Amino acid sequence: SMDQDEEDLQAICNWLRSSSQIVRWVKEDGLITQPVVNSYQNELVEAWRLECDDVISDSSGLSSPEQQGRKIYIKTQRESRRKDLAGSVPPTFVSDGQLHELADVEDIMTDKPRVIWNPLFVEQERSIGGAG
């Protein structure tokens, strides 16, 4: 298995590739519209919410928030790879990257950021990107 640094780097690469691919499809190629992207992201949020409820309600594991977050992320990632965008399933880097795209968005149900998907992602992105 990959060590944490490799996983973080992979997450950042997927996030960047996914973001630029979405922009290309929407703005440059005109293949999809922004409302279609928003709808796709909403489906990812719903998948996340279901996995989150399952993991958190399962008290048998009694794991740390980080372990719970990882479990929720992996389960959501698996589910998200089946979702289609504008009639076809996008490459896995797109679905994985879109999960990271949403990681910092505040959840309307909890008013807390969804960084539970990948808790270190934003800090890593800041340190590599230099912005913050």
Image (cartoon, rainbow, N blue to C red):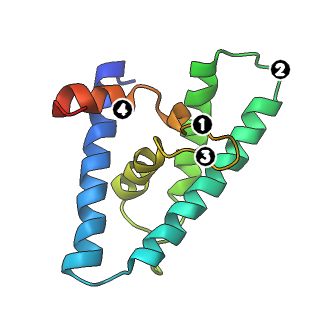
Location of mark 2 (residue): 60
Mark positioned earlier in the residue sequence (4 or 1): 1
Residue 7 visible in the displayed image: no
Residue 17 visible in the displayed image: yes
Q: CA distance from mark 4 to mark 3?
A: 16 Å
How packed mark 2 is, by other alpha carbons closer than 10 Å (few <14, some 14-19, many 20 or more), is few
Location of mark 1 (residue): 112
Q: CA distance from mark 3 to mark 1?
A: 6 Å
Q: CA distance from mark 2 to mark 3?
A: 26 Å
Mark positioned earlier in the residue sequence (2 or 1): 2
Look at the numbered disc 3 and give the secondary structure of its residue: loop
**Residue 130 x, y percent position in the rendering:** 16, 30
**Residue 21 x, y percent position in the rendering:** 26, 64
What residue occupies the far bottom of the structure in this picture? 30
Q: Residue at x 50, y 57 (%)?
A: 81
Mark positioned earlier in the residue sequence (2 or 3): 2
